Image (cartoon, rainbow, N blue to C red):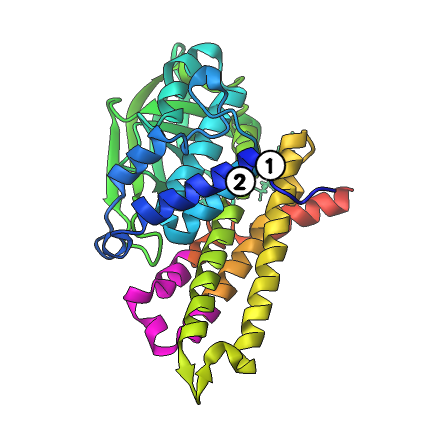
Amino acid sequence: MNFDLSEEQLMIQEAARNFAQNELLPGVIERDDKQEFPKEQIKKMGELGFLGMMVSPEYGGGGMDTVSYSIAMEEISKVDASASVVMSVNNSLVCWGLETFGNKEQKDKYLKKLATGEIIGAFCLSEPESGSDATSQKTTAEDKGDYYLVNGTKNWITNGNSADFYIVIAQTDVEKGHRGINALIVEKTMDGFVVGNKENKLGIRGSDTHSLMFTDMKVPKENRIGEEGFGFKFAMKTLSGGRIGIASQALGLASGAYELALKYSKERVTFGKPICEHQAIAFKLADMKTQIDAARHMCMKAAWDKDMGNDYTQSGAMAKLYASDTAMWVTTEAVQIHGGNGFVKDYHVERLMRDAKITQIYEGTSEIQKIVISRSVIKG
Ligand code: CAA
């Protein structure tokens, strides 16, 4: 078993680290404060290939493996989780879903633009009354012959206003349950599409999260991804990979906070010595480092499973469950190590703590991950 990263993976890690330090760190506190989407930075991320890392070069992507993507996600998330969620949704939920299940015409039309960041995408599953219980959604896509008539509301949509391309999951035949659901490509310019209010959030405040309303929106049949009734499975399969991205984001939040806390603990002096020399702090650092390394191994294993063609539903869910709990715990301890300074925005750790919370919620709550893991364990 080889734990070393390849030359290429090390280069990607360094490129992502440099980009985060040089382009994302300046202004990150202000963007969080003003809830400002990092528009220019996302454009540059697209030009550098961070938005379509795993897309095949034929469609303008980097053709990279999932391990490289996880490494880059960690580095970007150490500094700016609002930018990394855009990266995660665009790579794992939008580009991967379209490349894997879309037809040639759909890929020719949209994938290159998505992979290069010319346009960005959004994935629309959750609704006001159906987040975890995804089969009970109310948005309808009525079959009208050569188009679907779409009506309904989607909630908490990442990139809600910044996207141009939306994958909307909607119910065509209620009688058929999850087999009556379709995944449709929707463009923002379609008649009947309205972007609702922006959510005022606890964390990842730079990412723009909106509700979306559809009223008698006509979506051509050729915009359906996959066979009739494949929409729910499309969403589940896509989310299985998405969870590796969010696990890596959580890992980055934890390791970013840990690095800041370690540095601070070597500089801050109390009772005549740096605080890292007090056992109370030293043991916290030991626990933080141990949990972060465990989370990283789980992210790498899930990414590797995906690259090897193994089933990654269970390993991805376990990585997300563990890494998001690690992120919440480590960021909270990082604030504690910083004491009063940790409560102040200039020191970054309070933002990382606020950002960490969402990793236990989106792309399947921790409780949903436990359902996924336990069902897979019991099934054997
Ligand atoms: N891969 C492939 N197929 C899957 C699957 C997977 N991971 N999970 C389920 N399926 C299939 C099942 O095999 C079943 O198919 P058959 O009937 O043909 O056997 C079908 O899908 C229905 O599955 P279940 O009976 O297990 O469905 P369920 O109603 O019990 O729900 C669930 C399962 C796992 C709880 C699911 O509802 C779920 O994952 N919920 C959470 C949804 C979620 O993650 N939402 C996040 C929103 S997106 C987001 O946050 C994006 C963002 O903007 C950041």
Which residue is label 2 attached to? Answer: 10
Residue at the image point whose x is 38% and y is 52% from the top: 79
Q: Is residue 247 magenta?
A: no
Q: Nearer the viewer, residue 193 or 295?
A: 295
- Measured from the top left, where is residue 82 in percent x and y? 35, 48
Secondary structure at badge 1 equals loop
Residue at the image point whose x is 69% and y is 49% from the top: 374
Mark 2 beta carbon near ligand 1 (under 8 Å): no
Q: How would you classify the magenta stretch by its main secondary structure?
A: helix
- Compared with 87, 80 (above or below) is below
Q: Which residues are magenta?
A: 333-355
In-image side of 125 versus 33 (left or right): right
Which residue is label 1 attached to? Answer: 6
Q: Amino acid at mark 1?
A: Ser
Secondary structure at badge 2 equals helix
Looking at the rendering, the quadrant in which ligand 1 lies is top right
Can the viewer see residue 236?
no
Q: Nearer the viewer, residue 329 or 182?
A: 329
- Measured from the top left, where is residue 216 in percent x and y? 29, 24
- Compared with 249, 144 (above or below) is above
Residue at the image point whose x is 54% and y is 22% from the top: 100
In-image side of 278 versus 94 (left or right): right
- Compared with 314, 278 (above or below) is below
Label 1, label 2: how far apart the Cα atoms are: 6 Å
Q: Quadrant of residue 90?
A: top left
Dot 1 and dot 2 residues touching (CB under 8 Å): yes
Residue at the image point whose x is 27% and y is 35% from the top: 162
Q: Nearer the viewer, residue 90 or 194?
A: 90
Q: Is residue 344 magenta?
A: yes
Q: Amino acid at mark 2?
A: Leu
